[in-house]
Image: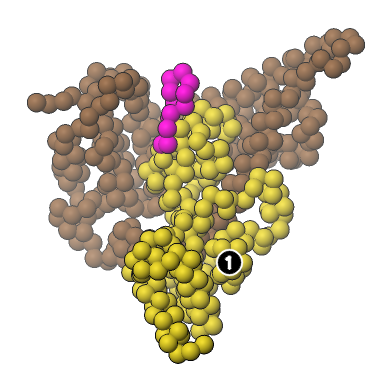
Chain colours: A yellow, B brown
């Protein structure tokens, strides 16, 4: 590798790193590519290199693939310290009713209120409202049946809240029993892109 | 043996209770002894106290379904037509299986929630910033500030109502109190704008105001702001359990009817 090439690579990394640092929200590879005047696959590669570097140097954060974009996230091991700083980590937990309802929406979307109630066996009007207010779900149409009831679906904020790159990373219904059987197996769904990145981050659970 | 102290509100609903009974008795869900299950279910449901009507309705509907299946099971099967006989339990079993599946999914989502949360994003949310400044709170806002804030909202032009809109929002104060209480259970503080936005209907805004006033009167919440005219915060007070059940029971009939006449946003010229 000649020096010039190394320099070019280094500066690309710096640009992408800077762009991500400046944004609190996840930023898509396409957006990063346009801003950094790079190709999208270059961005993906640079992110991979950056994460490798962070790991080697024992840095406090990694770049994760969340809700269709890249985002800086602190290592889970630091959660306790960050909480002492005043961040409400794990404090915004959804109620059991909200969690069940959003699970139904996530797996059956687009879905109307009546169908959700049929599955859960309870009235979900209040819960739906809470989820709408928290922007975890949204109205995504009307069913072509009598009364044209509203249909609900999940939002990008849903993916962000649950730390998922996209809906494809929700576990398949058929896999669930296996997953819940193995304590640690679920962490693999948190990883950004399969095994390429962030193995460290996804593989370690620090529950506090 | 049986725990007679069981509180029904620990169950998310009738399906949750059914699944609990099935697991507890290690019942094979593909061959449910429906008479036994129905009896046990009813035994629990009769212990319902202090459950609001809506919830109790959900539980009773399931009780009726179970009894209906039980009675259909008692009917003699038509001779020699075994193949055409449809097990009256089929639909229920399918529902239970589906529900159990979503219960598992929810469990999984809970784990994802935790795992995502402990990988902190950059930046503080508004709520977190507020909590950090807790010592700096100077002003205990009064009901006047609250009413002013609602007044500002009501003076704004209501959003245009779509012409085909025929459903009227029906919400009682008691119900709104319940919703706000649920929100406060998750986060101790709410920003005023979490509760009502500019898009809310006038009826909804007014019901929210009345609900907040009632909760403030009951000593359940406090209204605060960091500076005069700044963002209002609704803060849950740490309660003695005595007040918890206070405004929960609707003391007056739901005001749906009283509200309907004035509920439709009136376009002012």
Observer-nearest residue: B123 or A145? A145
Q: Residue at x 76, y 34 (%)?
A: B29
Q: Is residue A76 above or below residue A5?
A: above
Report whether B214 appears left or right of B268.
Answer: right
Q: Is residue A146 magenta?
A: yes
The location of residue A6, given as percent across then percent down, is 46, 85
Q: In which quarter of the image is the N terminus of chain B?
A: top right
Residue at the outermost right position: B80
Q: Is residue B220 magenta?
A: no
Q: In this view, does B1 lie above or below B222?
A: above
Give the residue number, with chain letter if any, for mark 1: A202
Observer-nearest residue: A67 or B215? A67
The location of residue A64, given as percent across then percent down, is 49, 65
The location of residue A12, given as percent across then percent down, is 40, 76
Does residue B55 appear in this view? no
Q: What element carries label 1?
A: helix
Q: Which residue is drawn at 51% across and 84% down?
A: A57
Report whether A104 appears left or right of A161.
Answer: right
Q: Residue at x 47, y 40 (%)?
A: A153
Q: In this view, does A123 lie above or below A132?
A: above
């Amino acid at each position: 590798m000649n020096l010039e090439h190394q320099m070019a690579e280094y500066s690309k990394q710096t640009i992408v790193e800077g762009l991500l640092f400046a944004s609190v929200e996840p930023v898509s590879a396409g957006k990063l590519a346009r801003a950094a005047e790079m190709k999208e696959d270059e961005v993906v590669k640079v992110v991979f290199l950056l994460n490798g570097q962070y790991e080697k140097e024992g840095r406090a954060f990694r770049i994760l693939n969340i809700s269709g974009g890249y985002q800086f996230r602190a290592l889970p091991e630091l959660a306790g310290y960050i909480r002492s700083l005043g961040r409400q980590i794990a404090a915004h937990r959804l109620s059991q009713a909200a969690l069940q309802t959003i699970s139904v929406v996530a797996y059956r979307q687009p879905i109307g209120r009546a169908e959700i109630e049929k599955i859960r066996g309870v009235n979900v009007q209040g819960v739906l409202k809470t989820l709408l207010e928290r922007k975890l779900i949204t109205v995504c149409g009307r069913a072509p049946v009598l009364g044209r009831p509203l249909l609900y679906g999940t939002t990008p904020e849903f993916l962000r809240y649950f730390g998922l790159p996209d809906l494809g990373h929700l576990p398949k219904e058929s896999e669930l029993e296996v997953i819940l059987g193995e304590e640690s197996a679920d962490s693999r769904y948190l990883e950004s892109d399969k095994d390429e990145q962030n193995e460290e981050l996804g593989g370690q659970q620090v529950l506090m | 043996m049986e725990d007679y102290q069981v509180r029904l509100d620990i169950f998310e609903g009738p399906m949750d209770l059914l699944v609990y009974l099935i697991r507890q008795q290690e019942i094979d869900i593909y061959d449910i002894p429906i008479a036994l299950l129905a009896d046990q279910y009813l035994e629990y449901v009769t212990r319902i106290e202090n459950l609001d009507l809506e919830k109790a309705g959900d539980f009773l509907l399931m009780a009726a379904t179970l009894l209906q299946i039980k009675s259909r099971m008692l009917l003699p099967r038509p001779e020699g037509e075994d193949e055409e006989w449809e097990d009256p339990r089929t639909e229920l079993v399918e529902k239970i299986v589906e529900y159990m599946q979503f219960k598992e999914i929810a469990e999984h989502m809970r784990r994802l929630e935790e795992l995502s949360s402990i990988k902190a994003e950059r930046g503080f949310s508004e709520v977190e910033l507020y909590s950090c400044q807790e010592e700096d709170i100077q002003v205990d806002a009064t009901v006047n500030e609250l009413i002013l804030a609602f007044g500002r909202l009501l003076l704004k032009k209501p959003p245009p109502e779509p012409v085909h809109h025929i459903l009227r929002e029906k919400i009682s104060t008691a119900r709104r109190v319940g919703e706000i209480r649920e929100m406060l259970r998750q986060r101790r503080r709410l920003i005023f704008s979490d509760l009502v936005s500019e898009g809310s209907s006038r009826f909804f805004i007014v019901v929210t105001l009345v609900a907040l006033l009632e909760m403030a009167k009951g000593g359940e919440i406090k209204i605060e702001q960091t500076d005069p005219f700044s963002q209002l915060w609704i803060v849950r007070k740490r309660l003695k359990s005595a007040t918890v059940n206070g405004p929960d029971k609707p003391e007056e009939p739901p005001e749906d009817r009283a509200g309907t006449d004035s509920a439709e946003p009136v376009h002012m010229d």
